[in-house]
Amino acid sequence: MTVASTDSGGGAGIMADLKTFTAMKVFGTAVVVSLTAQNSVSVKSIYELPVSFINDEMDEILDDIGTDASKTGMLYSSEIINAVSEKFKQYDVKNIVVDPVMVSKTNVRLLREDAIDAMVNNLMKISYLITPNIPEAEVISGQKINNAMDIKSAARAIYEKTGTNVLIKGGHYNGYYSDDILYDGHDFYSFKGKRIETKNTHGTGDTLSASIASYLAGGHNLYDSVSMAKKYIEGAIKYSFPMGKGYGPLNHFWMIK
């Protein structure tokens, strides 16, 4: 199950999540929390759905279909975050992957400033994995990240705040490689990846978190789920295609022959 926002351009958000679920051969359900009018260049407007409707969506899915794993994406406000967190607790949802979406690829704020506290103290504390990129990890940890040691320090700080596994994505870190660092409260695990030079990276965070959730739903452990998702995302970027005038989408179906 994905709990996130739409992307009218089709590259990110719930659209990317459902494509990823299909590519992973799992059945996906969707809870829409807000609508965005956007394309590859900009986010024009955001329409926040009423919390009462979001609650209805989650009740309808979890009362009937249920979920083996869930992921969250753009949640936008503290009201939405608190409502979603309460529903997760009400239904004792497991394997929650939180992608703490804060800013769009085109530098538009997708999480209100006053919602960060709710995300850290309510949602993240009941999740199984948090997947921030480096700018997001800096906000959550309160630390500046300039090198690999800083990434580990930030991961420790986030774990201490939330008690939750942390995967810090290295895509924003300069270098030939794009390594992701997983911290489980005891050990660090590095997932190496070669940096692919392309503008077609719209929706990478959504896609990665959706693929991890898919593998968790299939019964894989955390390490294997991240490892397989990392390979999937590299292929989706490698075989991506240009669309629009800005950041193009990934190729979510590159593995399907």
Image (tube, rainbow, N blue to C red):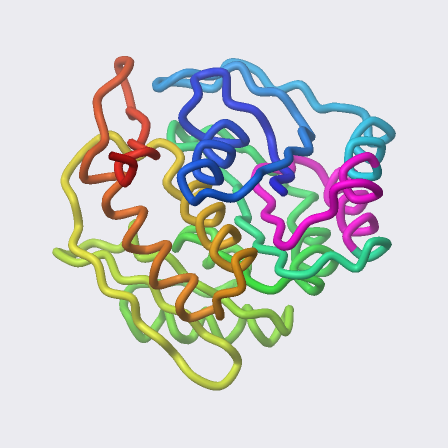
Q: Is residue 66 magenta?
A: yes
Which of the two residues, 209 or 21, is positioned nearer the viewer here? 21
Q: Residue furthest front?
A: 257
Which x, y percent locates residue 90?
86, 54
Which x, y percent locates residue 77?
70, 37
Q: Is residue 106 left or right of residue 109?
A: left
Q: Which residue occupies 42% across, 70% down?
A: 223
Above or below for 162 versus 213: below
Which x, y percent locates residue 115?
69, 44
**Residue 230, picture quadrant:** bottom left
Q: Is residue 216 magenta?
A: no
Which of the two residues, 196 or 23, is positioned nearer the viewer here? 23
Q: Which residue occupies 35% across, 18% down?
A: 41
Q: Is residue 121 left or right of residue 238?
A: right
Q: Is residue 70 left or right of residue 8?
A: right
Above or below for 86 versus 201: below
Residue 7 appears in view: yes
**Residue 249, picture quadrant:** top left
Above or below for 23 versus 229: above
Q: Is residue 105 left or right of residue 113?
A: left
**Residue 173, picture quadrant:** bottom left
Q: Which residue occupies 74% across, 47% down?
A: 66
User: Which contiguous range is marked in magenta?
Assistant: 60-88
Residue 112 appears in view: no
Q: Quadrant of the N terminus?
A: top right
Which x, y percent locates residue 5?
60, 29
